[in-house]
Amino acid sequence: MRTFHDAPTVATDNIGLVRARCALEVSSVDCLQTLKDQVCKLGGDVVWGVPDKPETIGDKNVWVARAAHTKGAVGGLP
């Protein structure tokens, strides 16, 4: 899975918004993996617009980003 903080540097087709909500005790690495899992479920192989850190809302950490699929990729692989 390719991850970008800004716009992807490869040609992609956007799929849509993805979000992961995790308890505060879940590590950022694990919660970010939950976000990537959401991208995979949508058939994507790129997640972009990933913030440097999650937003904390109440008792949850929330990651929000965009899912995309590499143009010309077969089966989610570039």
Image (spheres, rainbow, N blue to C red):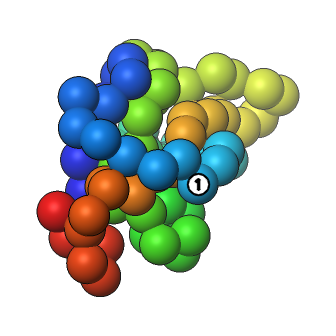
Q: Residue 2: tell me if it is visible.
A: yes
Instruction: Please tell me which residue is depicted at 26% across the width and 64% down the height of the picture.
Output: 72
Bin the neighbour count of mark 1 within 10 Å (Cα to Cα): few under 14, some 14-19, many 20 and up: some
Residue 29 as seen in the image, left or right of residue 31: left
Image label count: 1
30 is higher (above) or lower (below) than 6: below
Residue at numbered disc 1: 15
- In the rendered image, the residue lying farthest to the left is 78
Amino acid at pointer 1 = Ile
- In the rendered image, the residue lying farthest to the right is 58
5 is higher (above) or lower (below) than 38: above
Q: Position of residue 75 (x, y in %)?
A: 29, 82
- In the rendered image, the residue lying farthest to the front is 72
46 is higher (above) or lower (below) than 61: below
Residue 40 appears in which quarter of the rendering?
Answer: bottom left
Q: Nearer the viewer, residue 33 or 42?
A: 42
Quadrant containing the C terminus is: bottom left
Q: Nearer the viewer, residue 11 or 35?
A: 11
Residue 1 appears in which quarter of the rendering?
Answer: bottom left
SS at badge 1 = strand
Residue 53 as seen in the image, left or right of residue 24: left
Q: Position of residue 66 (x, y in %)?
A: 55, 40
Residue 72 as seen in the image, left or right of residue 17: left
Q: Position of residue 42 (x, y in %)?
A: 56, 70
